[in-house]
Image (cartoon, grey):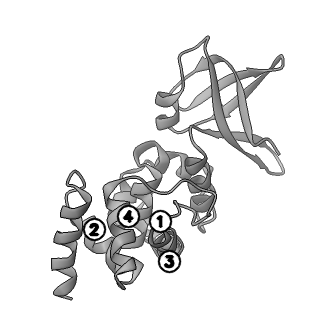
Amino acid sequence: MIYCLTGKIIKKTLDSAVISCGGVGYFVQIPATTGEALPPVGKEGTVYTIMNVTENDVSLYGFATEEQRECFKMLTGVTGVGPKAGLAILSIMTPEKIALAASSGDHKAFTKAAGVGPKLAQRITLELKDKVGKGLAANTGFSGNIAAPAPTSAPAQAVAALVSLGYAASDAAAAVARVDETLSVQEIITIALRSLSRI
């Protein structure tokens, strides 16, 4: 399996890149956010990859960070979510926003991605709610993997703090999702605690 590619970027579009490594040009499908994060054509860049092998196809999917890569793996593990839908979701949402939306049950956030209808969006939140809630609660990143970088956004830190106070991860995420994410961690926690006390 190819874990990552580092090399000269030969070609780059919104949804793909060609990276030259050791004289071989690898075609990698990417979300729009990775396309924006990669350096311009002619410069050296790195993508973290997932190789998908089927009867008729071998495809490489690339991501700017390991967290995006883990998020893609978790999304495509949901029944009905293929690589195309996974890339579409990661094109409009960061892994932390995906985790917050899934753990708070906000399926409408996923319908903004191309090719994701209401039924599929509900399935994503249903299947990922507990998985991502544990990762947010443990403050260990999207996948809940200890090796993954801890969430650094104010909402993710607020969820972790509320869980440490004894609230369920899904309740904490739902309360935080209703708060303006541009506020400080302390302000988010204060407002979320008010809404949790009414439950």
Tell me which label, 4 or 2, sits earlier in the chain: 4
Name above or below for residue 55 compared with residue 16: below
Point 43% across, 49% down: residue: 94
Three-letter amino acid code of the residue under disc 3: Asp
User: CB under 8 Å between callouts 4 and 3?
Assistant: no
Determine crowd level at label 2: few under 14, some 14-19, many 20+ residues with C-alpha closer than 10 A.
many
Secondary structure beneath label 4: helix
Q: Which residue is mark 1?
A: 139
User: CB under 8 Å between callouts 2 and 1?
Assistant: no
Q: Which residue is mark 3?
A: 130
- Mark number displayed over residue 176: 2
Residue 176 seen in the figure: yes
Q: Which residue is mark 4?
A: 101
Front one among 26 and 111: 26
User: CB under 8 Å between callouts 4 and 2?
Assistant: no
Please provide percent x and percent y for residue 91: 46, 42
Tell me which label, 2 or 3, sits earlier in the chain: 3
Front one among 39 and 60: 39
Secondary structure beneath label 1: loop
Of tags 4 and 2, which is closer to the observer?
2
Tell me which label, 3 or 1, sits earlier in the chain: 3
What is the CA distance from the residue labelled 2 to the residue labelled 3?
16 Å
Please provide percent x and percent y for residue 47: 64, 34
Name above or below for residue 13 compared with residue 78: above
What is the CA distance from the residue labelled 2 to the residue labelled 1?
15 Å
Tell me which label, 4 or 3, sits earlier in the chain: 4
In which quadrant of the rendered image does the C terminus lie? Answer: bottom left
